Image: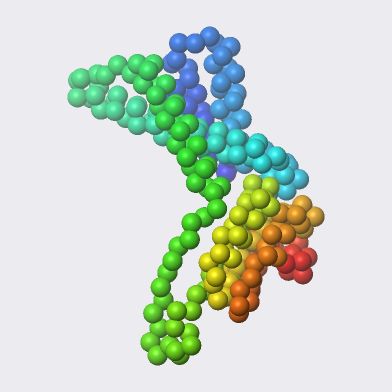
């Protein structure tokens, strides 16, 4: 059912976007197959070594699949908007002609939005500062800085290079205490051992503390607790 839901936008794109375009039938069939394939990224991930949460595929391929998946969803939404405008114009007796150029522009916009979305998702997150005011706080804790790192989900996507950048950024903040609040990884110890290695460089005067999240329990929780 989960994967069927994600198939609906792809079929909408095929029926309402691809089929009306003036292009050879063979090209429509190829593009339709690619759209359907992109919509089934989550299903395909289930059959990789790491499963849906940790597809063990090359990082570039994971990025490409996520971009394609997002592009199909955005294009389906844009095509729905185009159809809604066309329907409203018909109901008000001022029918609009949806030219091929409108569809091509919608496709370019969908691909651009998906690219921006993926870029934002895979970057090292920006620092969010939160000031907590506590009445009668002991003077020695005035200005105390606590750094929370949460839901890192270190995988083939968020790999050793990403973790290194994140750790360097975290250490540069000179926090008094660092806490890692769950979902550190996705994947087995064997598959992630190199990717989590940069976490060993986290340093803070009052220590670095971590707890497990639910995703650790998907992948050898006891081994991960011992390793981390």
Viewer-nearest residue: 109 or 196: 196
* x and y, in percent, of residue 155 in the image: 67, 51
Residue 20 appears left or right of 81: right
What colouring method underlies this structural image? rainbow
Q: Nearer the viewer, residue 137 or 187?
A: 137
Could you say which is closer to the camera, residue 6 or residue 157? 157
Q: Residue at x 48, y 20 (%)?
A: 18
Which of the 4 image quarters holds residue 143? Answer: bottom left
Residue 176 seen in render: yes
Q: Is residue 133 left or right of residue 189?
A: left
Q: How many marks?
A: 0
In the displayed image of the protein, which residue is found farthest to the right?
Answer: 190
- 105 versus 63 height, above or below: above
Q: Quadrant of residue 78?
A: top left
Please provide percent x and percent y for residue 6.
54, 38
Q: Is residue 127 above or below residue 203?
A: above
Identify which residue, 68 or 144, lies in the foreground.
144
Residue at figure coordinates x 58%, y 72% from the top left: 178
The quarter of the picture where the C terminus appears is bottom right
Q: Position of residue 99 (x, y in %)?
A: 35, 16
Q: Position of residue 63 (x, y in %)?
A: 60, 39
Going by the image, does 99 lie left or right of 49? Answer: left
Q: Is residue 155 visible?
A: no
Query: Looking at the rendering, in which quadrant would you find the N terminus?
Result: top right
Image vertical order of residue 223 relative to residue 161, above or below: below
Residue at figure coordinates x 51%, y 28% from the top left: 11
């Amino acid at each position: 059912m989960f994967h069927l839901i994600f198939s609906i936008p792809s079929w909408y794109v095929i029926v309402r976007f691809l089929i009306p375009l003036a292009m050879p039938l063979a090209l429509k069939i190829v593009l339709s197959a690619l759209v359907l394939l992109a919509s089934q990224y989550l299903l395909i991930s289930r059959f990789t070594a790491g499963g849906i949460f940790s597809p063990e595929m090359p990082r570039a391929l994971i990025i490409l699949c996520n971009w394609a998946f997002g592009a199909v969803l955005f294009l389906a939404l844009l095509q729905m908007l185009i159809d809604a405008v066309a329907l409203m114009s018909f109901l008000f007796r001022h029918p609009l002609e949806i030219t091929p150029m409108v569809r091509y522009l919608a496709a370019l916009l969908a691909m651009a939005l998906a690219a921006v979305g993926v870029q934002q998702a895979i970057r090292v997150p920006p620092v969010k500062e939160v000031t907590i005011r506590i009445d009668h706080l002991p003077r020695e804790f005035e200005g105390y800085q606590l750094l929370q790192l949460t839901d890192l989900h270190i995988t083939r996507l968020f790999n050793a290079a990403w973790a290194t950048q994140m750790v360097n950024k975290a250490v540069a903040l000179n926090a008094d205490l660092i806490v890692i609040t769950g979902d550190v990884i996705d994947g087995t110890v064997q598959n992630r051992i190199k990717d989590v290695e940069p976490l060993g460089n986290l340093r803070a005067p009052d220590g670095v503390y971590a707890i497990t999240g639910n995703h650790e329990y998907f992948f050898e929780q006891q081994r991960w607790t011992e390793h981390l």
